[in-house]
Amino acid sequence: MAETAELILNGQSITLPVIEGTEHEKAFDIGKLRDQTGYVTLDSGYKNTGATKSAITFLDGEEGILRYRGYPIEQLAENSSFLEVGYLLIYGHLPTQAELTNFSNQITKHTLIHEDMRKIFDGFPSSTHPMAILSSLTCALTGFYPESINPNQTADEHNLQIVRLMAKLSTIAAWTYKNSVGHPLNYPRNDLDYCANLLYMMFSFPTEKYEINPVVVTAMNKLLILHADHEQNCSTSTVRLVGSANASLYGSVSAGINALWGPLHGGANQEVIEMLEEIHKSGGDTRKFIDKAKDKNDQFRLMGFGHRVYKNFDPRAKIIKKAADEVLHALGLQDSPLLKIAQELEQAALTDEYFIERKLYPNVDFYSGIIYKALGIPTEMFTVMFALGRLPGWIAQWKEMRENKEPIGRPRQIYTGELERNYLPMAERK
């Protein structure tokens, strides 16, 4: 017998179906609640509301589990490339060699962006935040590919938009970085894989031969994989909500980029580096700042510790910690002052009872910020790198929402404003 819930309202019994997911997550189905009772639910921030059914990502914050399409994040980070994981998220299965080769070749083919984009780059003030440029140019792709606005495209046409966005966002991101530091732009190279090409476009100069460091490429793959999707977070929900209005893929992802830009969402790894630099400038006394973090009357907070979803540990942090150690060693930065401070904070979080009791463990943002800093990526570009990693997840969520023909999103509200009142002529207002 199917499980149900009973709601008693003014003596009347209303039966609510119970929906169960494949991992035994349960939810009350309130889809007909307003029609039946005239009532809606209030859940500020949607912390207890399932807005959709999704087969893409499973996350268990209590147990520290993250799986893409059923595959543990640990296995994917160890064995896959970013494009292979991107294919998995978007199309639902691990690709065969032929499928992955075709996907990779198609993305390589489309990494060039229209030369008119350079004119748009030139129009941004030098003070423009890279995320503003990234979101603007992502949305601007609808101007270069106006057919993307058509909500009735075929599957092949949708796939072309997907490939274009996967390909061109890496070039736009690299050019955004180059533009921000006043360097000449680099065109993509078809002989390099996705992550190597990204690093080449960001860090090579016309006057020098750029050497591809395989340790750095491996770390970049891992970073992007670990950020590729994370269930119904703020930016992902934004992509689905905008897309539910039949907005184009480019417009929907542009909205997601802006949501990610918010410091409460995508800016955590930038805050980690700013915290480490603050400690360094203050003399590097980590014990002083650890004590400040324990003082409830002090406004100082440790950035990159704990997680609002993972209650015991962040499964991504264990993976990226190893990559951070390898990158810093490969680049000869293992003795850097910021790293020393980071290691002391990490040790305190793992051994101090105050942090252990409160489950303030180092999370993925703590280590990813250190890697990006080691690579020479400016802190303002950290969220851009986050967006690159999250792109296949956004695409997969948008694609799933469209294929399931989900209705346009329309949250309800509880009105708390004034009751009806009459308009007052100017002379009668006080």
Image (tube, grey):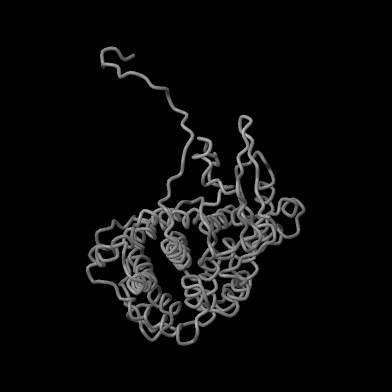
Q: In terms of depth relative to the viewer, which is nearer, 37 or 86?
A: 37
Looking at the image, how many numbered discs can be counted on the residues?
0
Taking depth in this image into account, of 167 and 343 the one nearest to the observer is: 167
Where in the figure is residue 361, as x and y percent of width and height?
A: 68, 58
Q: Is residue 422 positioned above or below 111 on the image?
A: above
Q: Which residue is depicted at the point 47% across and 77% down?
A: 83
Side of 328 where 24 appears, left or right: right
- The image quadrant that residue 188 belongs to is bottom left
Establish if 6 lies above or below 330: above
The image quarter in which residue 161 lies: bottom left
> Which quarter of the rendered picture does the N terminus lie within?
bottom right
Q: Is residue 155 above or below residue 267?
A: below
Q: Which of 220 and 186 lies nearest the eye of the viewer?
A: 220
Q: Nearer the viewer, residue 263 or 430?
A: 430
Instruction: Specify the quadrant that holds the C terminus.
Output: top left
Q: x and y percent of residue 284 in the render?
A: 62, 57
